Image: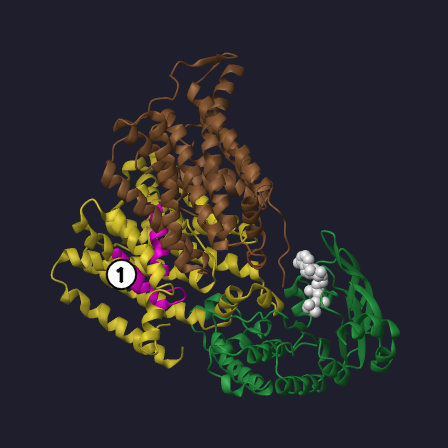
Amino acid sequence: MLAQFLQFLFSGVTVGATYALAALGFTLIYNASHVINFAQGEFIMLGGMLAVFFTQAGLPLPVALLLAVLLPALVGVLVEKLAIEPVKGAPTVSLIIITIGASLVIRGLTQVWLGKGTHSLPAFSGDAPLALLGATLLPQSLWVLGVTALVVAALWGFFNHTLLGKAMLATSFNSLAAQLVGVHTGRVLFLSFAMSGALGALGGVLVTPITLTSYDVGIMLGLKGFVAAVVGGLGNGLGAVLGGLLVGVLEALGAGYVSSAYKDAIPFALILLMLFFMPQGLLGARNTERV
Amino acid sequence: MALLEVSELSIQFGGVKAVQAVSFSIDAGMIYAVIGPNGAGKTTLFNLITGVYAPTAGSIRLDGQPVHGLTPDRLAQRGVARTFQNLQVCMNMLAIENVMVGAHLRLDRSLFKAALRWPALRRADAALRDEAAELMRFVGLAQYLTARADSMPYGALKRLEIARALAMRPRLLFLDEPAAGLNPKETQEVDALVRRIADAGVTVVLVEHDMKMVMNLSERILVLDYGKKLAEGNRDEIRRNPDVIAAYLGAHA
Amino acid sequence: MTTSRYLPLGALAAGLLVLPWLLPNSFYLDLAIRMAINAIIVLGLNLLIGFAGQISLGHAGFLGLGAYASAVLPTHFGWPPLAAMLAGMALTGVLAALVARPIFRLKGHYLAMATLGLGIILNIVVRNEAQWTGGPDGMPVLPFEVAGLTLSRDWHWWWLVSALLLLSVWMAQNLMDSPFGRALRALHGSEVASRGVGVDVAGYKVAIFVLSAMFASLMGSITAHYVGFVTPNVADFFHSIELVTMVVIGGMASVYGSLLGAVLLTALPQLLATFEGWETVVFGAILMLCMIFLPKGLAPTLAARFGKGGQ
Ligand SMILES: Nc1ncnc2c1ncn2[C@@H]1O[C@H](COP(=O)(O)OP(=O)(O)OP(=O)(O)O)[C@@H](O)[C@H]1O
Ligand SMILES: [Mg+2]
């Protein structure tokens, strides 16, 4: 009983960490620009696919992984420069369509370049499962959780203790005021996309040894990251992390105890319930609209 | 009985006490002004009375009936209309359609009749279009009868809001800084317009920073400062009130 | 929007009337029918997105609900197709209303999230309940038959769809130039102002959402009968996006823009077929370029360019 529960919990927390990274990506971009970046999932896909490509090309694992995280960050910057910046102030629907367009381009190019096959990546430190209270835990899961925890801590430090981080926070609260006190909001936007790209890709790189990857895994992962961000309270970083873990765990428990066929529906059922009963999310601020 | 009675009205946003225990009453048919320095809580007071915000404490009575906590659309049904300090014009519509929307509650809003171009509904709509045009002329927008709202200058949009509010045939009209951002000539025109609206029998509550206009138009004046009622009275009482001079007129001199 | 609007409507009618004789073969007639069907769906969606300013990223889910009602009820339960179609609409209406009430208190992205979630759940249900729906492979749909008459030939469908299209254009224009439609457009322009003049904003949003969803369901049923087969793809996220894209590229709040958007995006995959393997890339690039360079959509941009018309 307990062992089975733990087993579901482990796998839930592991995928949940990926959702959390994606949700953080959504949150960063949302805070900088109020854009929901539907291409976020493609960063996850790119991370995994590039890691596969570079390792197969014979690069040493650390170099391959680093490149697989940096290149998507560059892609994020390109998306921002080419597609988001030119349409500042466009209505929400148009922005959604632009980012969806970007996601199609990224997915399409990956498919043309690396094909439609499913790929795997060797685990970073072996496959021998660790036994824990009757359940087993993959060493890769520890990698996923450990690195995610580190990244979250680093981001926390960045936003609370560096000038640049504080400038980014200020922009999210009031972009005009931030501009007036000298924050370069264009640079904030740029940085947000780069960081989102890297965060998404990192999630992809970490989880691919467990889940496999292909050119089309981005949509679902991205949408679930979006769910996680909304569950946590759109715009709240800590909320995004909690939301990601919650979505991952509920999905794993649901798949284990209720129905594995409906696994993918669980996050979306969760979000609907959430929007009905707790529309501001776990940690989202309640605010009155000014007139 | 007073048309509008406000007592001990308060609202708080986080730590900001934007309106604190404000009481006053307005008789039907008068022009009543609310003045005070920036951030005094004038707009917030309007938002409370017109249902945009729900008060944290206090009561609002219209004709003796409690109306606090009612939503703006319910208050509209009771004849409360307003304009906005920050323009709230529907830029996706024609100017005249903005005015026609003001008559929303008086119209047959049936979906099916609308889709089928029901003759009675069409006739009512045509009549409304004429009425809206008439209102636009009344507020001085005769030249914009066929204009799109997003092609009009600021001063004209301010009046468009007034025309829309008048299309409701309100009993009580709240004007939030109708002359803000207007040049002296336009200000004078708005001054005259407010007078004509009041003469037509509408009770007007006015927030305005232009002291000449306030003193010229209003029978009674409420002065707010830091969310609190500083003074209330007729023009002369307000002009002479040392607190008002110190807190408000002083600050502006 | 007065008598002059009958001119474009007449032109559209004339065009629909002569088109079948201009088309070289049945392949093009089939394409034209699918364009017209999409045009009607997009028109309904544009009422919601363009006129009322509310986003739906799950509209394909409603389309799927209608399509599967028309597939499942006659096949497994022997319902007459018309009854199945109406049942699909009713079910969609109830579901949309249930979801809409709480959701329309929310704005922008939350609405997008909720509609997206609903669409995805509907799609997953259809994929999983294989004993009823055929699962991922889909299932055949019985022909549409009412009062002993069966719609079988393509040109039957063409007349039916053309008539529906004309009716929809006429009704959409009537609606938007009425107190109901003005209230919808007004709440798009300013919710505070609309409330202030007495518009029950939430009520109107729910009404147009339900209407637009039921409309999608109806068209889903019609598509299913026309094609004779239905797969879960009708209800998937990508199809929802395609529909929204048709609205935006044609022109938000533009009736004829809806038709233009539907025609272009229905034709696009045929054109893209020549880009073997690169379809997705080219499609994505076109979406982005359109939004960047024609943010208002085609019809309004063209209308501004060549004088009046457009609406
Ligand atoms: N929705 C809100 N949330 C938080 N604070 C608010 C809100 N609305 C108003 N306030 C605060 O309440 C106070 C009063 O604001 P209000 O807009 O009522 O002032 P005002 O008298 O209309 O000023 P002005 O003359 O500049 O228009 C201000 O400190 C303002 O920041
Ligand atoms: Mg104010």
x and y percentages locating residue B170 in the rendered image: 67, 76
Q: Neighbour class for label 1 at 10 Å: few (<14), some, many (≥20)?
A: many
Which color has been applied to chain C in this rendered view?
yellow
Instruction: Note the chain letter of the green one.
Output: B
x and y percentages locating residue C286 in the rendered image: 29, 56
Q: Which residues are magenta?
A: C238-266
Name the residue tied to disc 1: C263
x and y percentages locating residue A130 in the rendered image: 45, 13
Which color has been applied to chain A in this rendered view?
brown
Establish if B176 lies above or below C249: below
Is residue A230 visible in this depiction of the protein?
yes
x and y percentages locating residue C81 in the rendered image: 32, 50
Residue at 50 percent across and 45 percent down: it is A28
Q: Amino acid at mark 1?
A: Val
Element type at marker 1? helix
Establish if B222 lies above or below B71: below
Instruction: In the displayed orientation, state which residue is furthest to the left.
Output: C24
Q: In the picture provided, is C150 more to the left or to the right than C253?
A: left
